[in-house]
Amino acid sequence: QAGLTQPPSVSKGLRQTATLTCTGNSNNVGNEGAAWLQQHQGDPPKLLFYRDDNRPSGISERLSASRSGNTASLTITGLQPEDEADYYCSAWDSSLSVWVFGGGTKLTVL
Amino acid sequence: EVQLLDYGGGLVQPGGSLRLSCAASGFPFSSYAMSWVRQAPGKGLEWVASSSGSGDKRVYADSVRGRFTISRDNSKNMVYLQMNSLRAEDTAVYYCAQDWWLNWGQGTLVTVSS
């Protein structure tokens, strides 16, 4: 069960913009879309977006999500120290009937 | 307010068994699929198993199929993970989570070691 592809790390400066990517295929990301999760050290994951760009209540407007074909993207503007975390994408694979996760991207705010 | 309380982890010997439980509240439980996801120390998230809202459809990761069983009791708003034939590589924090990862439990640590 191959996972989704995410860059292992991204580093950006305070108040800059970071864009994280997640690449799958037409059976997972390209089908029902992706979810984005944020995880701070020692905490459970927290949902940021689901089915591409659906935002749960309470998620900052500085975050946005989109998809182009089989690649999903998460953009965080005006980076703050609290944005430093691990970010995971996930999607349902309709061909394999499994959930898949990306390996995670560690975002460092300099 | 949605709450997921997962528990039941602990230290178990290789080849042993353990049952994890997750108590849900704050949403129409039977309307949502529920899943278990694990995270080995210092590693990323790994999906383990999911159950449909009614419980009639269950799917598993290749790494646990045949050893783990997910089940739910909609009358009690509970979801379970029965883990048999445990291996060292099953050591992880196990989270229960709502459909599309809407909400997560705080996690329960399972350690498989002699």
Image (cartoon, coloured by chain):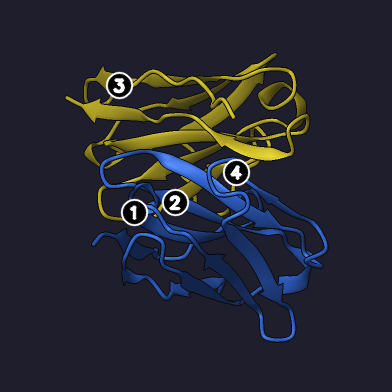
Of the two numbered discs 3 and 2 in the rendering, the one whose residue sits closer to the viewer:
2
Q: Quadrant of the C terminus of chain A?
A: top left
Q: CA distance from mark 3 to mark 2?
A: 21 Å
Q: Amino acid at mark 4?
A: Ala
Describe residue B69's horizontal placement relative to residue A21 as left or right.
right
Q: Secondary structure at mark 4?
A: loop
The residue that disc 4 covers is B61
Q: Position of residue B97 (x, y in %)?
A: 55, 59
Q: Which chain is yellow?
A: A
The chain letter under disc 1 is B
Check if mark 3's residue and mark 4's residue have beta carbons within 8 Å.
no
Q: CA distance from mark 2 to mark 4?
A: 11 Å
Describe residue A60's horizontal placement relative to residue B79 as left or right.
left
Frontmost residue, B43 versus B5? B43
Of the two numbered discs 3 and 4 in the rendering, the one whose residue sits closer to the viewer:
4
Q: Colour of chain B?
A: blue
The residue that disc 3 covers is A9
Of the two numbered discs 3 and 1 in the rendering, the one whose residue sits closer to the viewer:
1
The single residue placed furthest to the left in the displayed view is A110
Q: Earlier in the sequence, mark 1 or mark 4?
A: 4
Q: Position of residue A42 (x, y in %)?
A: 26, 54
Q: Amino acid at mark 3?
A: Ser
Do the residues at discs 3 and 2 belong to one chain? no
In the depicted structure, whether residue B7 falls above or below residue B96 = below
The residue that disc 2 covers is B38
The chain letter under disc 4 is B
In the depicted structure, whether residue B42 falls above or below residue A68 = below
The chain letter under disc 3 is A
The residue that disc 1 covers is B91
- Which residue is painted at 53% across and 31% down in the image? A64
